[in-house]
Image (tube, rainbow, N blue to C red):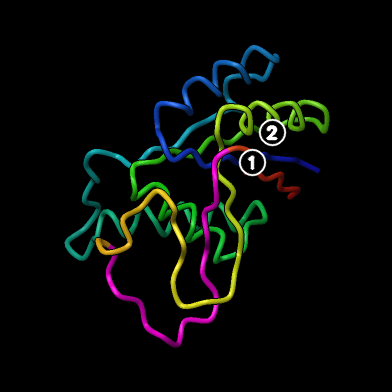
Amino acid sequence: MPKTVVGLFKNAGFVDEAVRDIEALGFPLQEVRTIKEPASFPVTSVMSFPRLDFEVELGRELTRIGATKPESRAYVEGLRRGGAIAFATGSDEKVDEARKIMNFRGAVNVEVVAGSAPHLPFVNQSDMPALDDDAVMAGRVRQPGGGAVLFVW
């Protein structure tokens, strides 16, 4: 059963350091990848909404490996705010070591909480659009370190 560790970094520069350390563990290049929000989004059709298409596809990929929808939304929001996501897939021992590296390099903790708005400590809340009061679940990003999550799929 494949195992993947996922880490969200609020600073896209930190992810490169983590990936170098993870690759030094002997992970094959195709088993370690990063996602940063693209500078531009390709238009695929007349009815295409490129940014939305990108975010929906990323959400699908995250839920496919075991993230909940609120967790997936929190990861996507982290990208919107200039962050980056690292993925490493491998054996139990290797993904555990990759998780430790991601946490050491500052992966932020994403958790699911009840409430109407996510709490993003590194984001100016006044810049965020208002959310409906009837939202039941939201993603929350906590302090850096200790946030890489292991998914078994």
Q: Which residues are magenta?
A: 128-144
Amino acid identity at mark 1: Ala
Among the two numbered marks 1 and 2 on one chain, the one whose residue lies closer to the N terminus = 2
**Residue corresponding to mark 2:** 99
Image position, residue 108 (x, y; %): 55, 43
| Secondary structure beneath label 2 | helix
**In what quadrant of the picture does the N terminus appear?**
top right
Q: Residue at x 40, y 41 (%)?
A: 83
Residue 148, compared with residue 68, is above or below; it is: above
Q: Where 145 sits versus 98, above or below?
A: below
Residue highlighted by disc 1: 148
The secondary structure type at the circle numbered 1 is loop
Crowd rating for badge 1 (residues with CA inside 10 Å; few <14, some 14–19, many 20+):
many
Graded by Cα atoms within 10 Å as few (under 14), some (14 to 19) or many (20 or more), the crowding at tag 2 reads: many
Left or right relative to 143: residue 24: right
- State the separation of the CA atoms marked 1 and 2: 6 Å
* Residues under numbered marks 1 and 2 in contact, where contact means CB atoms less than 8 Å apart: yes
Magenta-span inclusion, residue 141: yes
Q: Residue furthest bottom?
A: 134
User: Camera-side residue: 103 or 50?
Assistant: 103
Q: Nearer the viewer, residue 15 or 144?
A: 144
Residue 41 x/y as whole percent: 24, 46
The structure residue drawn at horizontal position 60% and vertical position 16%, both measured from the top left corner, is 21
Query: Label 2 is placed on what type of residue?
Result: Arg
The residue located at (67%, 45%) in the rendering is 149
Q: In this view of the protein, which residue sits in the foreground, 116 or 86?
A: 116
In percent of width and height, residue 111 lies at 61, 59
